[in-house]
Amino acid sequence: MAGTAHPELPGEDGGSLGDSAYESLRAMLMAGKFQRGDRLAENRVGEMLGVSRTPVREALARLAAEGLVEVRPNGSRVVADLWAKVSEVLAIRGKLEPFAVSLAAHRMTGEQFRALETLQDRMEKVLPSAASAMDELLDLNQRFHWTIVTYCGNASLVEVLDRFRPFTIFPRILTRYPPAELELAIGEHRAIMDALWHRDAAKSELLAAAHLERGIAAVRGVLDSR
């Protein structure tokens, strides 16, 4: 386990210690603070989070149910293969998010479109310095995609995709794109926005599907090279 600083747990007003431990440990897993197979001993994790073993035990049980933690035959808990989980989630996202984009094409207001355009403008401004501003670029990219999803008007679809959001930035696949590929990926947003502006649901869905497939292919490429 890396000996780096970790997010502080919120107080009791923010929810139970079990919930807090779960959220913090899940965030650490998604941020790549652990390696596959790292042992997650209750006492050690408790020390890192500043809580007792009981809320850690609850958190680990929930994370195991989500497939982020693997329970070994001897009862020990270790970090699961998160790369495989990411690949699975992106495959699902590749089918559901384009549908959300098509729904948004009929619902987006001018104000919402301008908010989306602001995010895209900022991404294009950051792009030339992507090597030193990858965190900002990743954040803007995630916000761009999520903004469209929230405009789809289907609460159940938003709820499902929200569950997968942490996996969309672990690991930082965008950093593995060659500069030309990265520029192309960000540039594809403009075509999607144009289809949304013209309320072309079919075209926006096709463009979003092709765009997301690029990300899925990048993950598969990384997995094949491991």
Image (cartoon, helix red, strand yellow):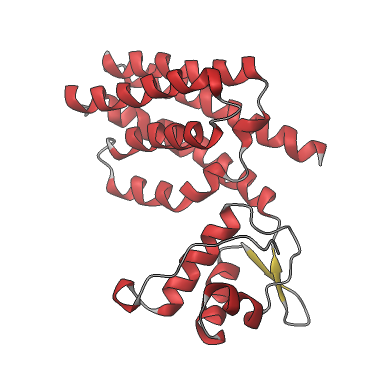
Horizontal and vertical percent for residue 146? 38, 38
Residue located at (68% from left, 30% from top): 176
Considering depth in this image, is 74 or 41 the residue closer to the camera? 41
Q: Is residue 206 above or below residue 97?
A: above
User: The N terminus appears in which quarter of the rendering?
Assistant: bottom right
Residue 92 shows up from this direction: yes
Q: Is residue 105 above or below residue 224?
A: above
Horizontal and vertical percent for residue 107? 21, 29
Residue located at (67% from left, 63% from top): 3
Residue 128 image-quadrant placement: top right
Considering depth in this image, is 60 or 123 the residue closer to the camera? 123
Residue 174 image-quadrant placement: top right
Residue 109 shows up from this direction: no
Q: Is residue 116 above or below residue 225?
A: above
Residue located at (42% from left, 33% from top): 140
Residue 76 image-quadrant placement: bottom right
